[in-house]
Image (cartoon, coloured by chain):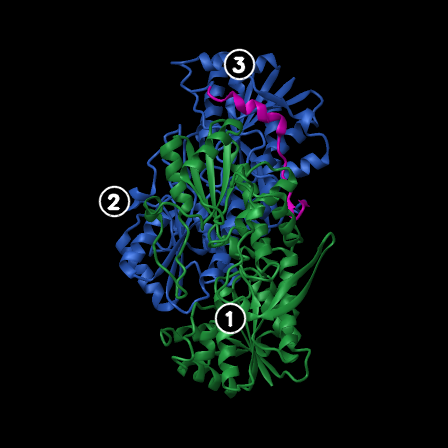
Chain colours: A blue, B green
Amino acid sequence: MNIAVAQSGGPTCAINASLLGVFRHATKYEEIENVFGSVNGVEGLILDNFINLCDIILDDDDVELIRQTPSTVLGSCRYKLPNFKTDSSVYETIVENLKKHDISAFFYIGGNDSMDTVMKLDDYFKANNIDIKAIGIPKTIDNDLPITDHTPGFGSAAKYVATTMQEIIRDSSVYSSKSVTIVEIMGRDTGWLTASAALLRRNYEIAPHLIYLPEVPFSVEKFLKDVREAQEKYYAVVIAVSEGITLDPAEINDFQSGKSDNFGHKYLAGVGKALEKIVARELGCKVRSIELNVMQRCSSHLSSKRDITEAERIGGAAVKTALDGYSGRMMIYRRVSNHPYNMRIEHVDVREVANKVKYFPVEWINKLHNNVTEAAIEYCMPLIQGEQNFRMKNGLPQHYVLRTALPHHKREGKIE
Amino acid sequence: MNIAVAQSGGPTCAINASLLGVFRHATKYEEIENVFGSVNGVEGLILDNFINLCDIILDDDDVELIRQTPSTVLGSCRYKLPNFKTDSSVYETIVENLKKHDISAFFYIGGNDSMDTVMKLDDYFKANNIDIKAIGIPKTIDNDLPITDHTPGFGSAAKYVATTMQEIIRDSSVYSSKSVTIVEIMGRDTGWLTASAALLRRNYEIAPHLIYLPEVPFSVEKFLKDVREAQEKYYAVVIAVSEGITLDPAEINDFQSGKSDNFGHKYLAGVGKALEKIVARELGCKVRSIELNVMQRCSSHLSSKRDITEAERIGGAAVKTALDGYSGRMMIYRRVSNHPYNMRIEHVDVREVANKVKYFPVEWINKLHNNVTEAAIEYCMPLIQGEQNFRMKNGLPQHYVLRTALPHHKREGKIE
């Protein structure tokens, strides 16, 4: 028998580690002959675009390089499967391709939307008595998947956010005149990643002085009042703000495209620039906004070793789960203890996760709605621990690039 | 006798290393009793706001932490001295304060504008037979100071730009549909830092496919033609663009504040967003712009060990230069050889540097004006070598913060 694995959704620093976990664990089983990588997520299943990972991951060098490479070596997609009851043709194509390569288990590494794909594939397989297992492996820097304690990729993104925030605080605190620095952080409509900026408190950092998350209402008047109060204490006020906070459309429309992806999610980003304009207008002081942008999801040079190690383990555990006969499951982390940190890997029905969102606990937000409590720091701190031992070349981190896959990228346009 | 040192202008990762160089070298001389740090650059000289560094840098722990802390531990300023022939009052105050503390040499770590300050102080001292030495120590991520082979701070910024560009390339290359990613890089009206994105070629990276520097004219039509041609070869086109390229004001005005600093330099930034809008309008494909923002000057977690080591050496050499009797000089690097890399530290008349700009050589830009040649890579490659051994705490780099200086920051407003 063979198995297949694919990567989907937005990149993270840990998604290639989970791919390695699947590959390396699978090679321990005699009954698994080949591990196929599906190029560009589920698109590869539809277009019969597979790469045999056994042909390309040849030695420890390859493993080490893939582990330290951010984003997805197999490419990604934002393709949404239709309901098979109204349109089964694409499912028939997928099954035909999987059977052609004797693939009896499919592992999909992704976020909320990818779990929708796992659920639909599993529904179709079961409804048609097709013995192919579909297992979801979580990943997202947003940390917004239900049930699992945290998601692979989040710890590295949190480490990046806290480290970079600290450097921005140093940078913004040099002048003797009043200034406001607004740092816009990803996380869609959840505040997990933005809250990680508070980790600096453990290292006696006072800033960021204000932290705004999308789980509580945002008011411009209240925001300006908070900034004015902070300016009475600090010359350089530093603010962390989630991309997902809700601003008056009149304030934000200049800065957002209004476009959405295939899953109907609006492209966010822009609140930092909007708040910058508001502060300049209302407070008249020097103000700068900084978007951490894609760097917060792809800065593998700053990844959390614990995150990468766990991501590899959960990939391996997924293979065992499929071989144990399960399908339609998503792998999860269950935290056992904080001191010392300990977690175990389990799995749940993917239907409990697909298209659902886990929000940042409102009880971890302070009463003034402009910061987070110690509980948030206690939760996040273990996830950013440890640094990867990085392989450098010419003074730069070395990356793994799947050159053989490049021609396949030319197949664009076949899927609409 | 005592000496004083100050830091000025925009932050870098190496400016604290130069401070350490001054301090540590000075402590080797018996005749130097105290090393005073002037808070917020030349503002400290005017406000009599000094910190005795001998009281706060007590052991190797302090030295290590200061070395790995970005930005300026003593604060900074953008204060421009008047012409002493028309207004000497501020000079009289400075001399009074320097004499009060028996300071006979002043070291100013900064860029083009700070060298203007060194020149003016030296002119005033000499015109009035005041025996105080003024020595400039270069620093700027822009690498735009004349005569010196390169500037402290540039190597670390170049390492950040190349490393981050590589991660952005991975991030932007995952989908099977056409996209354009525009990365806006600092450097004011010189292209040195943007050119460092080309270092990736040594590691077999093809992107960034297009690189635009301000030293040659920029045309939107030509840019769109370049992007269209690149799209024929690559699905994900990645572009590095200097903040200083000249765009039609109608295209850029929405994205720039139009404000200037005390030296009359316009705040740049915004060309990335402007080009994003143009690409979206003209090519209709997915497009994203990324501003590396202050991270490119303060990401000390990714600094070049060579840069930091050299920055400390040049600070030490400045002390020797003053004790040798020189004044009105700026320290420089002179490159001796590339293979193996070797440089020596010398000094030149600060008047040859102050308010002057060293542009990126046009002969290092390709004929099509959309990339740089191998000579640029050969020049830059030695400067990004080596990584600092970082001290971490709670999974985050540890920073040094001069808490005792904080109350002095309250003295704002005395200088207009």
Q: Which element is circle 2 on?
A: helix
Where does the magenta region start and end?
A: A392-413
Give the Cα distance between marks 1 and 2.
Answer: 41 Å
| Mark 1–mark 3 CB contact (< 8 Å) | no
Estimate the x, y position of residue A88 in percent, counting from the top left.
43, 13
Residue A409 is inside the magenta segment: yes
Confirm whether circles 1 and 2 share one chain.
Answer: no
| Residue in view at x 62 percent, y 49 percent | A387
Residue matched to label 2: A250
Do we see residue A326 in this rendering? Answer: no
Q: Which element is circle 3 on?
A: helix
Residue matched to label 3: A95
Residue matched to label 1: B74
Q: What residue type is labelled 2?
A: Ala
| Residue in view at x 38 percent, y 48 percent | A213
Confirm whether circles 2 and 3 share one chain.
Answer: yes
Where residue B390 sits, quadrant-wise, is bottom right
Is B353 positioned to the left or the right of A30 in the image? left
Q: Nearer the viewer, mark 2 or mark 3?
A: 2
Q: Which amino acid does label 3 sit on?
A: Val
| Residue in view at x 53 percent, y 14 percent | A95
Estimate the x, y position of residue B42 in percent, counting from the top left.
47, 74
Estimate the x, y position of residue B220 in percent, counting from the top left.
41, 39
Do we see residue A377 in this rendering? Answer: yes
